[in-house]
Amino acid sequence: MTRSPETSHVMSASDMDRALTRIAHEIVESHRGVEGLLLLGIPRRGTILARRLGERLARIDPDFDPEQSIGSLDITLYRDDLRAHGARTPEPTTIPGAGIDGATVVLVDDVLYSGRTVRAALDALQALGRPAVVRLAVLVDRGHRELPIRSDHVGKNLPTSREERVSVLLGEVDGVRREDEAVVIQRPAAGGER
Ligand SMILES: O=P(O)(O)OC[C@H]1O[C@H](OP(=O)(O)OP(=O)(O)O)[C@H](O)[C@@H]1O
Ligand SMILES: O=c1cc[nH]c(=O)[nH]1
């Protein structure tokens, strides 16, 4: 008999909002302001979260100009599992303003797991220029790293087992209402097929 996976909510929409607000404050504090800051989201959900972080940065410090300081970094062609999974359709890379040379780039993603996406992002960045500093902000760190990568800013550390799947549900991608956005863990039902 096939059982459906169990799903549990681990962050609500307001938990996510609060986490992003805290991360925005952390970024300003660790960078000592917003000059030279460039947020680059990893599509697709990282790009949306980068935009939301940027809105908060602009509220904290009006010198932060979202138009000039938020972009998107596609990593599709830099993945190390291209051979195993085949190519995905690339999303646009958009680098605003003066580019990445000399900037403090904050990579933004929804989930940090093996670290392979971030490794690919570092390769993608290197092809574009030479930032002064690269940092990482993620909404959820679920552990199980396969590479020596850690996040500077974390919305929530979430202990998980490898069998579980963490999903960040966002209106723009998943079609949920803003108030129904959430982080959920799906675990295979005990005794069920996967
Ligand atoms: O640290 P990692 O092991 O690389 O995992 C993290 C990545 O996995 C997810 O993307 P995924 O490739 O699953 O694509 P999707 O969310 O668009 O399905 C997530 O958005 C991260 O980018
Ligand atoms: O659980 C996981 C693993 C990789 N990427 C995700 O988004 N969730």
Image: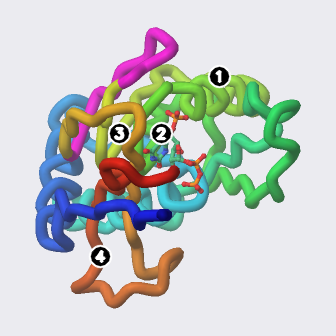
Q: For residue 178: magenta?
A: no
Disc 2 marks a residue whose amino acid type is: Leu
Instruction: Report how far apart the C-alphas of labels 1 and 3 lie in the structure.
Output: 19 Å
Closest to the observer, 107 or 181: 181
Q: Residues within 10 Å of mark 4 (few under 14, many from 20)?
A: many
Mark closer to the chain start, 3 or 2: 2
Apparent side of residue 45 relative to residue 79 in the rendered image (left or right): left
Q: Is residue 54 above or below residue 178?
A: above
- Front tag of 3 and 4: 4
Apparent side of residue 176 relative to residue 159 in the rendered image (left or right): right
Mark 1 and mark 3 residues within 8 Å of each other at the beta carbon: no
State which quadrant residue 33 falls in.
Answer: top left
Closest to the observer, 2 or 54: 2
Magenta-highlighted residues:
144-155
Mark closer to the chain start, 4 or 1: 1
Q: Position of residue 146 (x, y in %)?
A: 50, 15
Residue projecting furthest to the bottom: 177
Tell me which residue sits at (26%, 83%) in the image. 180
Q: Which mark is residue 107?
A: 2
Q: For residue 152: magenta?
A: yes
Q: Which residue is mark 1?
A: 130
Instruction: Report how far apart the C-alphas of labels 4 and 1 lie in the structure.
Output: 35 Å
Mark 3 and mark 2 residues within 8 Å of each other at the beta carbon: yes
State which quadrant residue 76 falls in.
Answer: top right
Circle 3 SS class? strand
Q: Which residue is mark 4?
A: 181
Disc 4 marks a residue whose amino acid type is: Glu
Tell me which residue sits at (60%, 23%) in the image. 119
- Front tag of 4 and 1: 4
Mark closer to the chain start, 1 or 3: 1
Q: Which residue is mark 3?
A: 137
